[in-house]
Image (spheres, rainbow, N blue to C red):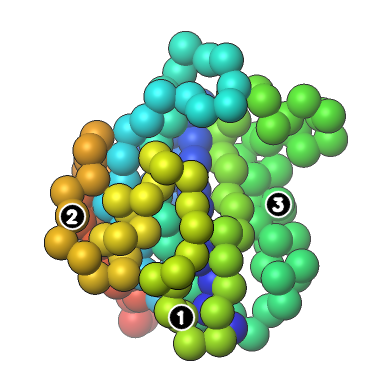
Amino acid sequence: MYYLCSIGSNMEPHHHVSLAIDELVTQFGQLSLSSVIQTTPVGITSRHDFLNCLFVVESPLSNHELKGRFVAMEQAHGRDRSDPLCKVKDRPLDIDILASHPHGDFSAARVDSYLEALLAELCGEAVDPPGKISLSTLGMQIGMRPCQLAHPLH
């Protein structure tokens, strides 16, 4: 199954998003990654901007099992998922599954408006998402354009 997922962070976001991408590539071997954008908080009151991106990963895991892995990653990065207000607080890492598809066709998927250009980009449209930034991960600069990341061969 292919999964369309999002990453968000507004606490040390460059650090946490870069590490999360490295960890995802290590766990899953390959993923398609959108540009990385800086956004103002949506749905929470905070003075800290977010870094956001989308990715597509192929996995034999069920939706529930994959979300469990993402929650474990969030907790390892310091997110307190036991806090009933964790959805409206600043966060070091937030990874969500937005859609799944057996063949990876997300052209009809629906995302929040601030992520629409990133989804269009992943679907092959020539768009220029506002707020693009660059990150260093896996020894590469990423984030300014969609890319395929694969675990380096040792």
Q: Which mark is residue 104?
A: 1
Q: Residue 129, how many percent across, how many down?
A: 23, 45
Q: Earlier in the sequence, mark 1 or mark 2?
A: 1
Query: In the figure, 119 relative to 60: above or below?
Result: above
Which residue bears the numbered disc 2? 127
The residue type indicated by label 2 comes to Val
Q: What is the crowding at mark 2: few (fewer than 14 residues within 10 Å), some, or many (at least 20)? A: few
Q: Residue at x 58, y 50 (%)?
A: 95
Q: Which mark is residue 27?
A: none
C-alpha span from label 1 to label 2: 20 Å
Q: Residue at x 70, y 70 (%)?
A: 63
Please, what secondary structure does the residue beneath circle 3 have?
Answer: helix
Q: Quadrant of residue 100?
A: bottom right
The residue type indicated by label 3 comes to Val
Q: Camera-side residue: 16 or 108?
A: 108
Q: Residue 131, how many percent across, how many down?
A: 24, 35
Q: Is residue 22 at all visible to an observer of this figure?
A: no
Please, what secondary structure does the residue beneath circle 1 have?
Answer: loop
The residue type indicated by label 1 comes to Gly
Q: Residue 122, how many percent across, how many down?
A: 31, 65
Contact check, label 3 and label 2, Cβ < 8 Å: no
Q: What is the crowding at mark 1: few (fewer than 14 residues within 10 Å), some, or many (at least 20)? A: some
Q: Is residue 121 at all visible to an observer of this figure?
A: yes
Q: Residue 105, how many percent across, how many down?
A: 43, 79
Which residue bears the numbered disc 3? 71
Q: Outermost residue toward the top?
A: 47
Query: In the figure, 17 relative to 72: above or below?
Result: above
Q: Camera-side residue: 108 or 92?
A: 108
